[in-house]
Amino acid sequence: MIDPATKEEVLIEALPYIQTYEGKTFVIKYGGAAMTEEQLKQTFAKDVTILRKIGINMVIIHGGGRGITEAAKAFNIETKFIEGQRYTDEKMIDLVVMMLAGKVNKEIVNLINTNGGNAIGLCGVDNLLLKARKHMPEGVDLGLVGEITSVNVPFINLLVQNGMMPVIAPIGVGENGQMLNINADLAAGAVAAALKAEKLVYLSDIEGVIVNKKLISTLTRSEAKKLMEDGSIFGGMIPKIRSAFDSLENGVNKVHIIDGRIKHSLLLEIFTDEGIGTQMTHED
């Protein structure tokens, strides 16, 4: 049993954060273990519902790569990766739409609504929510993969102003009406920048930015640049860090990478002084 004094300290510590963030917008990129393990799915739904109930506008962008890969096997559709990125052909885009905009999206919405969260499921095709163009990183052709060119901000604002929580599958629509598969991390960054969000939070399967076996709690671009140059930050973390700072430059106030494998990690990062992950901030 938790000591009553401890409960009081927790609530008092959270109060100034609740007051600061009331009416602000948070964009959450939902993925990893938090999306697949039943207990973590439940705590995520409760966490975002609590945040919405205390007056924070919540917008969720979700992935679903594991489910797509499993479905591709079941339908005997070849899964091909080029330099670690999924190649999307005509058959694969049909599967992506079926899984992301259908099964995965509606499961998340249902879970949140079961906990009283007032979620509404969308994908980028709805009301031209996410307009996109073909994405070819460094000239690599990934097929029907897109990058966001515009976000229908008035549409999202209309929903959140009426108490709803948009849950968005990262599927964009091109100029010719072609649906495009969009990386969920990049989609979350683009949506957060368009909304000038107070926070962009990446729920992942890592603690945050680790340097010399220690968690870095706060990171600025200049600090990150030094750590990348000396090799302390390397591999797959580099594009995630660069994307985070691009979001900051485009209007987001803070970006967080937190461990979604920890129960209530979202609340612990936002409402405690120490937090549990890495926050990336402006230089000042």
Image (cartoon, rainbow, N blue to C red):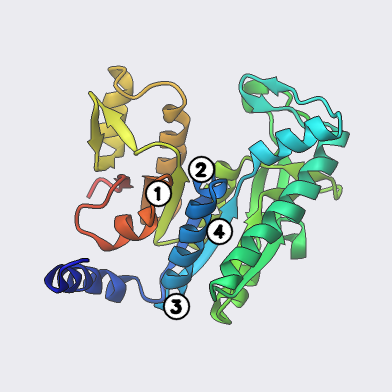
* Image coordinates for residue 243, horizontal then vertical, percent: 47, 39
Query: In terms of sequence position, does the residue under pointer 2 or pointer 1 come before the other?
Result: 2
Query: In terms of sequence position, does the residue under pointer 4 or pointer 2 come before the other?
Result: 2
Query: In terms of sequence position, does the residue under pointer 3 or pointer 2 come before the other?
Result: 2
Looking at numbered disc 3 in the image, what kind of residue is underneath it?
Answer: Lys
**Which mark, residue 53?**
3
* Mark 3–mark 4 distance (CA, rounded to whole Å): 15 Å
Left/right of residue 269 with respect to residue 76 in the rendered view: left
Q: Is residue 150 visible?
A: yes
Q: Nearer the viewer, mark 3 or mark 1?
A: 3
**Which mark, residue 60?**
4
Q: Nearer the viewer, mark 3 or mark 4?
A: 3
* Mark 2–mark 1 distance (CA, rounded to whole Å): 26 Å
* Image coordinates for residue 180, horizontal then vertical, percent: 76, 43
* Image coordinates for residue 20, horizontal then vertical, percent: 29, 72
268 and 6: which is toward the camera:
6
Q: Secondary structure at mark 3?
A: helix
The residue that label 1 is drawn on is 248
Query: In terms of sequence position, does the residue under pointer 3 or pointer 4 come before the other?
Result: 3
**Which mark, residue 33?**
2
